[in-house]
Amino acid sequence: MPYENILVETHGPVGLIRLNRPKALNALSDGLVTDLEKALDVFEADRSIHVIVVTGGEKAFAAGADIKEMAGFGHMDAYLNDFITRKWGRLATCRKPTIAAVAGYALGGGCELAMMADIIIAADNAKFGQPEITIGTIPGSGGTQRLTRFIGKSKAMLMCLTGQQMTAEEAERAGLVAKVVPAADLLDEALRIANRIASMSLPVAMMVKESVNRSYETTLAEGILFERRVFHSTFGLADQKEGMSAFVEKRQPNFENK
């Protein structure tokens, strides 16, 4: 499928999507978001793809939403068109594991997009921020919600109320990113982690993702009950039988993803 604003590759069981509007620092235009949604749909439907990696360029993962596109909107334009809702949240609804490999600026919608992934791997030059207040608006795609859950109320308030950016090292300490690596190693490290995940049973990986995400949506008691029911269900998988047999027999498992 041809795309105008992204580049798509496959690396064995890993699907790679590169945001590709370099002259605009990968600003999230309607066209880019549409292309991203379509590519995610294709990888979700492809049973040979187990993990999806989303990345940008060296200077910017995505420097925010495309301000030129939205500057002239009125209230009813934004409301009736459900702006920043349709298509924008597709990464967050992927059932397969996802990784955001972030170099350079991840600001505004770019930071929000990265937070929709399951894991963020950051280059040492990455900068995260929610600067919407500096242009007279607020985050609209999860910036006040996911960021608060990831780094806590006080740090989220600081970033959203001042527009202050967070370095990669600060983001790792705060829990926003899982790992910081040299910029030159970013994609290799993201693909290494993706291939490690892809070597596991795909249905089990999807169950892990669903269970961890459940912890953000419910109480501890309900979350543990959900986890336990999913754990019980794994005993109906051929991959559970293979995995435990391989452990007992001291060999590598051969998962068939069923």
Image: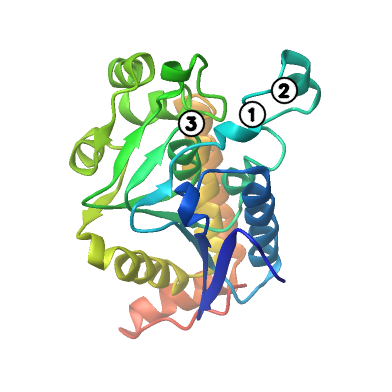
Residue visible at 67% across and 23% down?
A: 72
Q: In this view, does 150 lie above or below 162?
A: below
Graded by Cα atoms within 10 Å as few (under 14), some (14 to 19) or many (20 or more), the crowding at tag 2 reads: few
Horizontally, residue 139 falls left or right of residue 90, namely left
Q: Is residue 117 above or below residue 149?
A: below
Which of pointers 2 and 3 lies earlier in the amino acid sequence?
Answer: 2
Kindly indicate the quadrant of the structure image that contains residue 250: bottom left
Q: What element carries label 1?
A: helix
Horizontally, residue 156 falls left or right of residue 65, namely left
For badge 3, the amino acid type reads: Tyr
Nearest the camera: 126 or 11? 126
Can you tell which of label 1 and label 3 is closer to the viewer? 1
Expressed as whole percent of the image width and height from the top left, the position of residue 171 reads: 26, 38
For badge 1, the amino acid type reads: Met
Residue visible at 29% across and 48% down?
A: 178
Label 2 and label 3: CA atoms lie apart by 28 Å
Q: Can you identify the residue that label 3 sits on?
A: 216
For badge 2, the amino acid type reads: Ala
Expressed as whole percent of the image width and height from the top left, the position of residue 232 reads: 55, 53
Q: Can you identify the residue that label 1 sits on?
A: 70
Label 1 and label 3: CA atoms lie apart by 31 Å
Identify the image quadrant of the N terminus.
bottom right
Can you tell which of label 2 and label 1 is closer to the viewer? 1
Q: Can you identify the residue that label 2 sits on?
A: 78
Residue 182: which disc? none
Expressed as whole percent of the image width and height from the top left, the position of residue 176 reads: 32, 38
Residue visible at 62% across and 25% down?
A: 71
Horizontally, residue 8 falls left or right of residue 45, namely left
Q: Is mark 2 on a helix, strand or loop?
A: helix
Graded by Cα atoms within 10 Å as few (under 14), some (14 to 19) or many (20 or more), the crowding at tag 1 reads: some
Kindly indicate the quadrant of the structure image that contains residue 237: bottom right
Asked whether disc 2 touches disc 1, contact meaning CB atoms under 8 Å apart, the reply is yes
